Image (cartoon, rainbow, N blue to C red):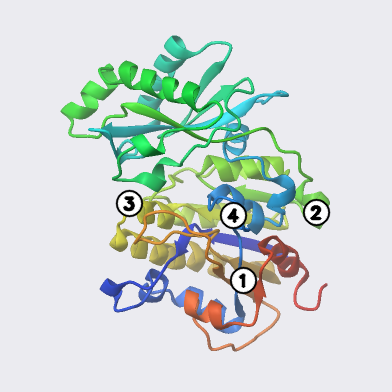
Amino acid sequence: MKYLALIPDGSADLPLAELDGRTPLQAARTPNFDRLADGGVVGSAQTIPEGFPAGSDVANLCVLGYDPHLYYTGRAPLEAASLDIALGPGDVAFRCNLVFVEDGVMRDFTAGHIDSDSAAELIACLQDNLGNEEAGFFPGLSYRHIMVSKGTALKAKCIPPHDISGKPIEAHLPSGDGGDWLRELMEASSRLLADHPVNRARIAEGKAPANMIWLWGQGTAPAMPSFRERFGLEGSVISAVDLVKGLGKYAGLEIIEVPGATGWLDTDYVAKAKYTLEVLKTKDFVYVHVEAPDEASHAGDLNAKIEAIERFDSLLLGTLLAGLEGFGEYRILIMPDHATPISIKTHNADPVPFISYDSTRRENSGQAFDEENARSSALRFDRGWELMEWFLKGPEGK
């Protein structure tokens, strides 16, 4: 038996007036989703436990089968692991976004999806000028980077920049214990980056400058059992997102780098499917994560979100279903890690829909894959981290 968990990040949504009361999942053309929903079962899972932030870190931890109450320490340590940044005892990792702030307003939390080479120059400038025994800056990909401190500001209250798109930043700057120090770093970064040659060139080209850092998502290194220890399976992770790859590393899963995987609408869905099929020749389990629907939601781009969902269905899932015929028995779990409603441009804690499909069974549910059918289903996991074990064992618990 082969097992696939397919994650169209943030694809769950709310009914929209511009879609005549439908959600993007309902409006999108998704024949492969609906084929598996009809042949399998549809349900819902609470992947954001009460009291936890509605983030991809908590949600993907849940989907992989780990109780956040036991294993969640923060987002940034996961991303640090993906970048091979070792955290010692007392080290605190922070997510360090390069952002575009203008007139005190968060104009773009991705700094125009800045390219990694340009971003690396800016992070190097910060390390040269602000790096010391208290703070170290490490380059990642695009706008996503890491700052590591020596236990400083672990308890500060930090707001994710994608939660305040288009809003004044003043009321959302770090606060609480250590917040002053974080604000000083962020203000110093704006002075250093404002006239940097990289940003002068970006402005000349009509691109958003990366004129400030935003620090958030802090935490220490988690200690968690491997996926093999939890479930007895060897597996791999395919994703363009650092936090998902870092989570995979802490879970002892192999990280598969796929050329053309970008984390945006232009990601190579077919390549992700082909690499998945290749991995399944030697592994039992593959966790395939696609960021594009979530990014479109944060941008408030409804057409892009629908297109991302449709590409996931046709290019990724369609390619997988054609290739899986040669593997014999398999199970597929399809679910967003969390909802990201277009109307609020950020995540919420609503339960998410899922499909569980087993090639050896035929349920004939007659259902499509969407939020409404999931809500009406009797199959619900209030403890979202219990879904993975149920999926792997199957309805008979085997």
For label 1, the residue is 325
For label 2, the residue is 230
**Where is residue 14 drawn, in percent x and y?**
41, 69
For label 4, the residue is 59
Q: Earlier in the sequence, mark 2 or mark 3?
A: 2
Amino acid on which the number 3 mark rests in the picture: Ala
Amino acid on which the number 4 mark rests in the picture: Ala
For label 3, the residue is 299
Q: Image quadrant for the C terminus?
A: bottom right
Q: Nearer the viewer, mark 4 or mark 1?
A: 4
Secondary structure at numbered mark 4: helix
Amino acid on which the number 2 mark rests in the picture: Arg
Secondary structure at numbered mark 3: loop
Crowding near pointer 4: few (<14 within 10 Å), some, many (20+)? many
**Where is residue 254 drawn, in percent x and y?**
67, 44
Query: Is 126 situated above or below 26?
Result: above
Q: Nearer the viewer, mark 3 or mark 1?
A: 3
Is residue 219 left or right of 338 when viewed as pictured? right
Residue positioned 30% across, 33% down in the render: 100
**Where is residue 338 drawn, in percent x and y?**
52, 59
- CA gap, disc 4 and disc 2: 18 Å
